[in-house]
Amino acid sequence: MSKAKSFHMSAEEFRRQGHAVVDWIADYHSRVEEFPVLCRAKPGEIRGQLPASAPQRGESFEQILGDLGRIILPGITHWQSPNFYAFFPSNASGPAILGDLVSSGLGVQGMLWSTSPACTELETHVLDWLVPMLGLPEKFLSTSGTGGGMIQDTASSASLCALVAARERATEFASNRKGCDGRLVAYCSTQTHSSIDKDMKIAGMGLENLRHIDVDRNFSMRPEILVRQIENDLNAGFIPCLVCATVGTTSSLATDPVREIARVCRDHKLWLHVDAAMSGTAALCPEFRSIHDGVEFADSYTFNPHKWMFTNFDCNCFWVADRKHLIQTFSILPEYLRNQATESGAVIDYRDWQIPLGRRFRSLKLWFVIRHYGIEGLQHHIREHVRLAQQFAGWVREDSRFEIAAPTQLNLVCFRLRAGDDANQHLMEQLNRSGDLYLTHTKLDGKFTLRLCVGQTNTQARHVERAWQRIRQETEKLGAR
Amino acid sequence: MSKAKSFHMSAEEFRRQGHAVVDWIADYHSRVEEFPVLCRAKPGEIRGQLPASAPQRGESFEQILGDLGRIILPGITHWQSPNFYAFFPSNASGPAILGDLVSSGLGVQGMLWSTSPACTELETHVLDWLVPMLGLPEKFLSTSGTGGGMIQDTASSASLCALVAARERATEFASNRKGCDGRLVAYCSTQTHSSIDKDMKIAGMGLENLRHIDVDRNFSMRPEILVRQIENDLNAGFIPCLVCATVGTTSSLATDPVREIARVCRDHKLWLHVDAAMSGTAALCPEFRSIHDGVEFADSYTFNPHKWMFTNFDCNCFWVADRKHLIQTFSILPEYLRNQATESGAVIDYRDWQIPLGRRFRSLKLWFVIRHYGIEGLQHHIREHVRLAQQFAGWVREDSRFEIAAPTQLNLVCFRLRAGDDANQHLMEQLNRSGDLYLTHTKLDGKFTLRLCVGQTNTQARHVERAWQRIRQETEKLGAR
């Protein structure tokens, strides 16, 4: 049979261009410190260089790769720069990039066990590996009887799943059938990540039914206020269903008193969800594992290897103590998805644990990372980041122009000039504009506060030293204004 | 300064191993026809080969890649085999794999415009490209004034966003504030994808408040029944908010009468969401563009390049006619995400258009695909798949042992033996067990029906010919039982 006409990329072409892309990435990572960390493009500047319509005829891969460097790269904020200290890291690493590449190459759908058993089984297995690695309770193991873990895209989605499952547990699945009735309430602190607010809206529970409990001077939830609020709500006819406790808030990396909150949850039969999106990774090191104190009482727990564990976005890990609430909440089995393995009950179909149906083979990159680094390699880099952040906090403390704005937890330093909001905002903007480093802010006690988070894969002592040097330089200029 | 101890993969190592992974993928795609399409592993078989705990010390990349071939590959159902006809395709291609690799390498977060302007602007731009490519209405263009498009992970999530936005439009954002009250109803057909059922549960609207409207003999929604149901609901005090019309159902690729449904929606001020997850891609060809008749009246529209447009999962495209409902529904702006660009209002922050906060640079792979193939290349392969499916349907029609179970739309053939459910199920299982091809089933008119969907990137005439030959062979054996 004659070879049919084809526009597909041939195997030889894929090999050649694939090598070129790998080299492009290696070069990019080698040169990343040369670029301004925060992108300087103006709104519309990138789009303005793109043709108004799609090409009628295919273009060469060389052209595409050329435009990547010429048009796209100047529009990038360099999250993989070792001088990136903004928000939280979204770090990548060689083994993660290559694990994800294998996932793209295999191109499997993991919605059902049967649609690629390895996709489900490797995920379950690696999530089981992480339970002792992080000092999490055995009830989260897939082999524990009722528990189990899985990969979600983000902590926002994992928390939404926890919230919806808690909603259904509290109403005995009536909300699933008839819809919410406006009486369900959930609890977090004033410092909890905004995704919980968003999740309350999506889940039809209403933002006004999320109680933001006040915090103490360390920005940790005050359990006695939580108790009082729950009692008020019960008296008013509301139905409390979930408390979200945070291990490492976004603002200041504060940790809620999980053990005390767990006691409150037990007394009132509330679902305890623990969000350790950023800080969870620290528990890889025994000396930081106390952040997980009380997590043994949680109904669900989540952390993001795509933040601080050298695993490319998206990779959120989510465990539940009793998977049946999740499955009963999300399960829908149309005829076209029926299959023998599912009917046998001997397998996990992860589509019933999440919002979407389809799912990518995301455990490959996590498996590659854990095997490449080994537990000791991961521990080494986490320890080093914490050490550098604490060292930075020490420098800030010794400089009387500055103050520390919150206890320095792990790898995040919250600090500010003793000079008012405007000066701090100006300092931040000058630093970011210089391109030498990128850091972001929050408000603590109503004051504009700089955040420096040490977590990018390649951040070393010299980068943090240079960051402090640049901060002092810009502060001096500020004084001379 | 002395080089700090590091467990990271060096640039040279990344280059070397990256080339090895690219070659591994090229080899895999070259050999994929040798493997049984549907995986033969037993539950637990893959896990059973993995060590019980994570390695303390890092392992060599060669070991990891070795285990990939030895342990993982036998656990794969080969979605990238040209003999894959099951469900819907989840096809990959060279340019998509490499575009995704660049995304992993850059490792940027696209949650805000400012966190990488190119990530937002390329996405907006490529989604604008697709509007005329698919014959979609101009109101979906980002430059139209109120509309715009974006990439979601899946059609399930896109539909959830449409549903929640419709919910809020109908209640003037009261459900967002106070939660749902059980009175909101939505409409789809008995053939609509199960994700809408799931979305109703997640959104707190309740599955009982989703009306599954009856279909005609072509499995298309009957608008007169829709009208009657809406009137009944209004009389009963319910609040109708959304109709989901499907262009290409999962069972049989049936298309709902969008234009007539749009008229009903306009009369009753309902949100019209059009789900063209699978079939939408066909509209790239002018001769199939009539599937989009009436879409000019839709409030939102979604299709999946990750199904039939040679772009790796996950890549769903989602457009809205008026983005303000979506943004007002999802927007939450905590201090730590505030930035000048957002405050200026001159940019899009896609986090306000979706469930999660974080987002990957997914438009790169779509850009690579469109540029590599060009419009004519995409059209060529879509046409060829449709031609092969229609040819297959012709062979089925000519064989008196078989019947066609639904009109053969585009690239999906629904057919069955004239011999009862057991025979059809047995035939399917024998074929799938042989490893020569993989197809799945549905129920139409209560009867077990085989589905053969021609859409995998590399499926050519010889594969479809061979599939029909194997079906006839197994049918003959069946007769001899």
Image (spheres, coloured by chain):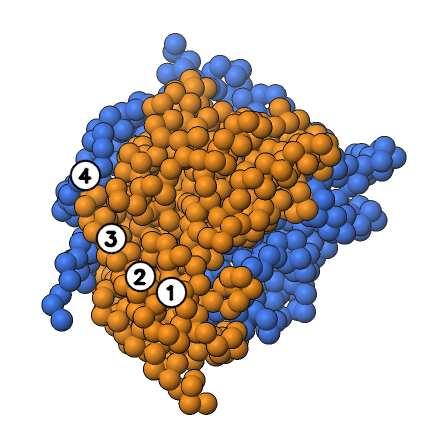
Chain colours: A orange, B blue
**Mark 3 sits on what residue?**
A383
**Mark 2 sits on what residue?**
A389
Query: Residue flagged by tag 2: what amino acid is it?
Result: Ala
Q: Chain of mark 3?
A: A
Q: Chain of mark 4?
A: B
Residue sitting at 51 percent across and 75 percent down? A420
**Mark 4 sits on what residue?**
B55
Mark 1 lies on a secondary structure that is strand
* Numbered circles on residues, count: 4
**Residue B81 visible to the viewer:** no
Q: Are marks 1 and 4 in contact (CB under 8 Å)?
A: no
Label 4: few (<14), some (14–19) or many (≥20) C-alpha neighbours in 10 Å = some
* Quadrant in the rendering for residue B466: top left
Mark 4 lies on a secondary structure that is loop
Mark 3 lies on a secondary structure that is helix
Residue sitting at 46 percent across and 61 percent down? B110
Determine the residue located farthest toward the left in the rendered image: B2
For the residue pair A170 and B36, the one nearer the viewer reads as A170
Query: Residue flagged by tag 3: what amino acid is it?
Result: Arg
**Residue A419 visible to the viewer:** yes
Q: Are marks 1 and 2 in contact (CB under 8 Å)?
A: yes
Label 3: few (<14), some (14–19) or many (≥20) C-alpha neighbours in 10 Å = some
Q: Is tag 3's residue or tag 1's residue first in the polypeptide sequence?
A: 3
Label 1: few (<14), some (14–19) or many (≥20) C-alpha neighbours in 10 Å = many
**Mark 1 sits on what residue?**
A452
Q: Is residue A466 left or right of residue B62?
A: right
